[in-house]
Image (cartoon, rainbow, N blue to C red):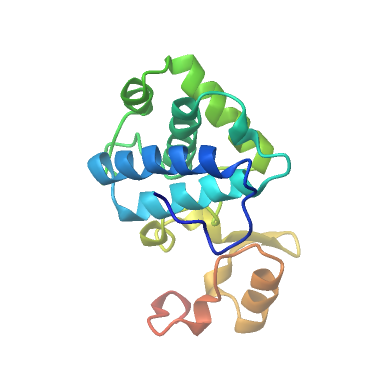
Amino acid sequence: MVKKPAGGRISDEVQPAFDGISKMVDDFCRDHLNEEYAILCRNLTEKLARKRPSPLVSGKPNTWACGIIRTIGWVNFLDDRSQTPHMKLPVIDKAFGVGESTGQGKSKLIRTMLKIRQFDHHWTLPSKMDDSHAMWMLEISGFILDVRRCTREVQQAAFEKGLIPYIPADRPDNSETE
């Protein structure tokens, strides 16, 4: 049985749906992706389970699992052949026994509901964050700048506003800011 997440309470009504969907997501990530994907997919499943009312109690669990994995795959360009792991998104649909339009639709619903976009640092694989240049581009005083090349004070302000995932100047290997 999947453990309840520590990040918030999942209601007793939602817990069975959460457990079933989490198991499907974990199994798929273990068999086809990797632990980084599994963690992000679990986090997304938890976020949907804690939403009030939780959408996970309506619809088929396999469709939700498919949509969750598709969403994380979409953010991280899983269908790009230069990525490892790499997988075309319709393969996810087939693995869960749903049609391509159903998988696309559920992923779009999740992205819209939670305002998820590509280069969203909340849903980007940690191993890909430093390589994702678009994530670090911010408009400052009308200029587009790579915030990693800005002062620590600017980075701190961007971090406090939730615009970047961490303060690059505080990392021990901050060669980007040198």
Residue 5, image x and y in percent?
Answer: 52, 59
Along the line of sight, which residue is nearer the eye, 54 or 85?
A: 54
Along the line of sight, which residue is nearer the eye, 157 or 107?
A: 107
Residue 75, image x and y in percent?
Answer: 48, 43
Residue 113, image x and y in percent?
Answer: 68, 37
Farthest residue to the right: give it: 141
Q: Residue at x 37, y 28 (%)?
A: 89
Q: Residue at x 33, y 20 (%)?
A: 94
Q: Residue at x 23, y 41 (%)?
A: 31
- Position of residue 160 in the picture relative to residue 170 (left or right): right
Look at the image and tell me whether residue 1 can be seen.
yes
Along the line of sight, which residue is nearer the eye, 30 or 101?
A: 30
**Is 120 located above or below residue 54 in the figure?**
below
Report the number of discs: 0
Along the line of sight, which residue is nearer the eye, 147 or 114?
A: 114
| Quadrant containing the C terminus in the rendered view | bottom left
Q: Residue at x 36, y 60 (%)?
A: 127
Farthest residue to the front: give it: 12
Look at the image and tell me whether residue 119 can be seen.
no
Which of the 4 image quarters holds residue 58?
A: top right
**Is 28 located above or below residue 59 in the figure?**
below
- Position of residue 145 in the picture relative to residue 28 (left or right): right
**Is 110 located above or below residue 96 in the figure?**
below
- Position of residue 77 in the picture relative to residue 169 (left or right): left
Residue 79, image x and y in percent?
Answer: 35, 34
